Amino acid sequence: MTEQTGGPAERGPEPADPGAADDEAHQPGLFDIPPGARQAPVRIVLLTGPSGSGKTSLTRRVGLPVVALDDFYRDGDHPDLPRRYGIVDWDDPRSWDHAAALAALLEIARTGRAQVPLYDIPTNRRTSVRQFDAGDSPIVLAEGIFAAELIADLRDEDVLADALLLWRPRAQTFWFRLMRDLGEARKPPLTLVRRGLSHARSEPAMLAALERRGARRMRVHEAESHIRDLAARAW
């Protein structure tokens, strides 16, 4: 008679149940992350709207730390700048460094600090950099005509507090924009008038496009009250 081998004492360990590890890994609480552990210490309020809609004056009144997104324009000699009517189209988002602006805001949200450029609009170039510090503020404002380009990115990273679209009647926007640009000698006067009229004609379509991106339309006084409420809220 042939002796049988391979009894229970001689066989190797039974194969592991392939579902056991998964069951263990999905036990409630095993890999729970404490509430707030992923929450950034600083949240970003994006402030957009037509040039001359009151973004900069609003940020001065509320007194919160501000990142001027216009400082992320590309230098005037950048080879990929978009052009229109034979000149650089500074109203095209491609004239602006989206990646650099996003990286700076994410760094601010996570650490409260970041290096940001300083841009000189009359000469179309970055002149220096500065250290931005949010201090102990839970809210940082990021304002500029291209702010809505960042809504989806900041929402995905869970650092977006809100995205607001300022608006006022077109005639007011045209006038305030022209007075500011002439006072700062941003471009030759005739260029400023032509651009202002072009902006006024396209403004309704611009506002609709910004709303489609997720910005919420508000008058200036409404936005100011809302931002103050956000700053006072315990995130």
Image (cartoon, grey):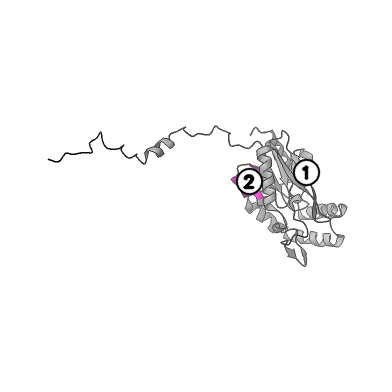
Decide whether residue 152 is among the magenta residues: yes
Quarter of the view holding residue 91: bottom right
Image disc number at residue 154: 2
- Of the residues under marks 2 and 1, which one precedes in the sequence? 1
Q: CA distance from mark 2 to mark 1?
A: 22 Å
Q: Where residue 146 sits: x, y (%)?
A: 70, 52
State the residue in front, 64 or 75. 75
| Residue 203 visible | yes
* Vertical order, 99 against 228 (above or below): below
Element assignment for label 2: helix
- Residue at x 68% of width, y 52% of height: 98
Q: Where residue 51 sits: x, y (%)?
A: 77, 53
| Span shown in magenta | 150-161
As shown in the figure, which amino acid type bears the numbered disc 1? Arg
Q: Where residue 168 sits: x, y (%)?
A: 75, 50
Quarter containing the N terminus: top left
State the residue in front, 70 or 197. 70
Image disc number at residue 130: 1
| Left or right: where 193 falls relative to 41 | right
The residue at the far left in this view is: 1
Quarter of the view holding residue 109: top right
As shown in the figure, which amino acid type bears the numbered disc 2? Leu
| Residue 220 visible | no
Decide whether residue 34 is among the magenta residues: no
Element assignment for label 1: strand
- At label 1, counting other C-alpha atoms closer than 10 Å, the crowd grade (few under 14, some 14-19, many 20 or more) is few
Q: Where residue 34 sits: x, y (%)?
A: 54, 32
Q: For the residues carrying marks 2 and 1, which lies nearer the camera in this image?
A: 1
| Left or right: where 8 falls relative to 20 | left
